[in-house]
Image (cartoon, helix red, strand yellow):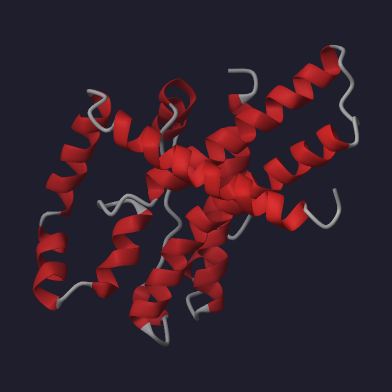
Amino acid sequence: MLFRLPIIFLIIAVHETAHGFVAYKMGDNTAKNMGRLTLNPMKHLDVLGAICMLLFGFGWAKPVPVNPMNFKKRDKGMMLTALAGPASNVLMALLGVIVWTILKAYNVIPQEMLGGFIDRFLVVFVMMNTAFAVFNLLPVPPLDGSKIVEPLLPPKARIWLGRNARILSLVLMILLLFGALSPVLGKLNQWMLNGIVALSDLLLRPFL
């Protein structure tokens, strides 16, 4: 819990700011005008979502407001804006693995209590970012994954998804609460973590 709380604040701040920043670059000023283009976690905090992240490992933040009508290319704008959040978490996880690897390779982390604290913090930081990215990439409303895949769907499927968004959201929450998705999420988390570690090794190979 000691590690999770500050990490949650950092994760939601970067995740939602990434959404708002890409939306702004794509032509939508809504998040900027509402003061949501900021790394202040209190601007993005959803109390229930943060508690779920703290206790269960999955959760959500207060969504950054986006007006698709302001995008020059609506589908492309929505897809990139939605993708920006999970992508920011993947990048943070990658950064965490790189820092952890460098500290270990050069014996920067001491073996006493402080070293154990730093080591554990980085591990939890990486795992939580990976889990948050995977969870948000699920193609179920209102998660980012649904907004990423929606522009790729045929018109009838997009209409069906919009009409059934609330039902799908409720089904998702029930499955999560009963742990039905835990095996799937665990496997996806492991695949993503393996990919991030492999990419970190590739990037650091010339230096270590």
Toward the viewer: 120 or 146? 120
Q: Percent from the top left, x then y, of residue 179? A: 26, 24
Q: Percent from the top left, x then y, of residue 170? A: 17, 39
Q: Percent from the top left, x then y, of residue 117? A: 76, 19
Question: Which quadrant holds residue 180?
Answer: top left
Determine the residue positioned at 85% across, 48% down.
208
> Does residue 162 appear in the picture of this structure?
yes
Residue 162 in the figure: left or right of residue 122: left
> Does residue 35 appear in the picture of this structure?
no
Determine the residue positioned at 27% across, 30% down.
176
The total number of labels drawn is: 0
Residue 59 in the figure: left or right of residue 7: left
- As drawn, 67 above or below 171: below
Residue 139 in the figure: left or right of residue 188: left
Determine the residue positioned at 17% across, 53% down.
165
Q: Quadrant of the N terminus?
A: top right
Q: Percent from the top left, x then y, of residue 134? A: 42, 45
Q: Residue furthest bottom?
A: 72
- As drawn, 79 above or below 121: below
Residue 121 in the figure: left or right of residue 19: right
Determine the residue positioned at 53% across, 42% down.
193
- As drawn, 132 above or below 149: above
